[in-house]
Amino acid sequence: MSTNFKHDITAIVSQFCLEGKISAIEPYISGHINDTFLVRNEDPNCVDYLLQRINGNVFKDIPAMIANIQQVTSHLRKKLAGQPGSDVTKEVLYLNKTRDGLYYYKDNSGNYWRIYNYIKDTNSYNIVTTEQQAYQGGLAFGRFQALLSDLDINLLTDTIPDFHNIEKRLESFRKALLADPKNRVKEVTAEIDFINQRADKMCAILRLGEEGKLPKRITHNDTKFNNVLLNKNDEAQCVVDLDTVMAGYVAYDFGDAIRTSVNTAVEDEKDLDKIDVNIPLFAAFTKGYLAESKIFITPDEVNSLFLGALLLPYMQAVRFLTDYIEGDHYFKIDFPEHNLQRTKAQLKLLLRLEKHSEELQALIITAASS
C-alpha cells in the first residue's frame, strides 16, 4: 500500500490499535479546519476508520479537546445503552487508542492525529432539501443536548475560549480593521457598516446569560447541518464533529443549525439572489429540536432561540470578514476572495431571517407548546 500525502499516513495509522488489516487510505471530506482520510479495512468483518489530522492552529490544547470528546461519548454511550432499540456503535462516535494508550498520536512534526470508527451507510447534507431531513436534524441536536443535560459542565474544558462570545469576536474584528495588514478594509466598507449597525443587538444572548436568565449547558457549538449523520431512510443516527463540545447556551446550537439548514443556498453562495429562508424547513427543524429538548429547556431559553438564529449567521460573517481582513489564516480558502464571498452570503441570510422574524418566532412558540 502506498500513499501520496505529505505525511507518512501509513506510519501514523500503525500507531493505533486497530482491528483487521488496512487496504487503502484516501482523502475523505474537506472541512474548514481538519484534514480527514478514510482508512479502508481489508477484513469485511472489521470496521473502516476515519483518520484526522487536528488543526493545532485552531485548537491550542488538543489533549484537553480529546478528553472532552471521550468524556462526552462515554456519557452518551452509557445513557443510550439503557434505551430500547439503541445501537451505540452507530449512534455515538468511538475513538481508538494508540499503542501508548492515548486517544491521539503526536508525530515528530508536532501534528496531532486521531482515529474514529467509520459509521457506514449514512448521509450528511450541506443543503437540506426535505422537511424529513430538517425534522430529523432537529431531533438529533435536541436529543444530543438532552442526553448531556445531566453531565457536569465543569468536567469539560473550553477548547476554544470565547468561541461564541460575540463581544470578543467584535473586538477581534475591530482590531483587524485598525491593523488592516492586507490593505483590504477599503474594499469592505458596506459589510463593515452592516456589522456595526447590529453589534449591540447581537449581544443580547450574552446579556441574558450575565443576568442569570440563560443557564450554561453542554452544547455542541458547531451544529452545521452536515454534522448530523442520517441513515438511508433519512432518520437521525449520529451527531459528529465534537471538537467544540463545551459549555454554552442552547441558542448557539439552535442558531447554527438553522443557519445551515434553512438557507436555500450554500454557505459561500456567490449569487446572493439565491439566498433565502426556507420556512417549512425552519418549522420542521424547530419541531424536531423542541420535541427532544423540551425535557430540560426553560421558557427563557425557548425565547432565546430566535436570537440565536439571528446571531449565528451574523457571527459567522464577522469571523469570515475578520479572517479576510487579516489575510485568510484561519479558514481554508479555495480562491483569494473566498472569505469575503462567505461574508456576503451570511449577511444576506441574516437579512432574510430578519424579514421573516415574526413568522419564524411564531413557529418556535407553536413548536414549544405542542
Image (cartoon, rainbow, N blue to C red):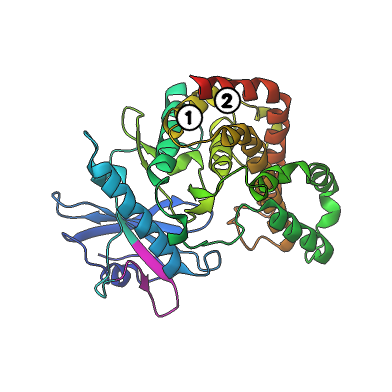
| Location of residue 208 with respect to 56 vertically, above or below | above
User: Element at badge 2?
Assistant: helix
Q: Are marks 1 and 2 in contact (CB under 8 Å)?
A: yes
User: Element at badge 1?
Assistant: helix
Residue bearing the label numbered 2: 364
Instruction: Please identify the quarter of the rendering in which residue 233 is found.
Output: top left
**Residue 37 appears in view:** yes
Q: Earlier in the sequence, mark 1 or mark 2?
A: 1
- In front of the other: 56 or 172: 172
Instruction: Identify the residue at image location x=69%, y=26%.
Output: 357
| Location of residue 73 with respect to 3 vertically, above or below | above
Instruction: Identify the residue at image location x=69%, y=22%.
Output: 358
Residue type marked 2: Ile
Residue bearing the label numbered 1: 290
The x, y position of residue 351, in whole percent, is 73, 32
The x, y position of residue 364, in whole percent, is 57, 25
**Residue 221 appears in view:** no
Q: Quadrant of the N terminus?
A: bottom left
The span shown in magenta is: 102-114
The x, y position of residue 68, in whole percent, is 41, 60
- In front of the other: 230 or 92: 92
Q: Is residue 273 magenta?
A: no
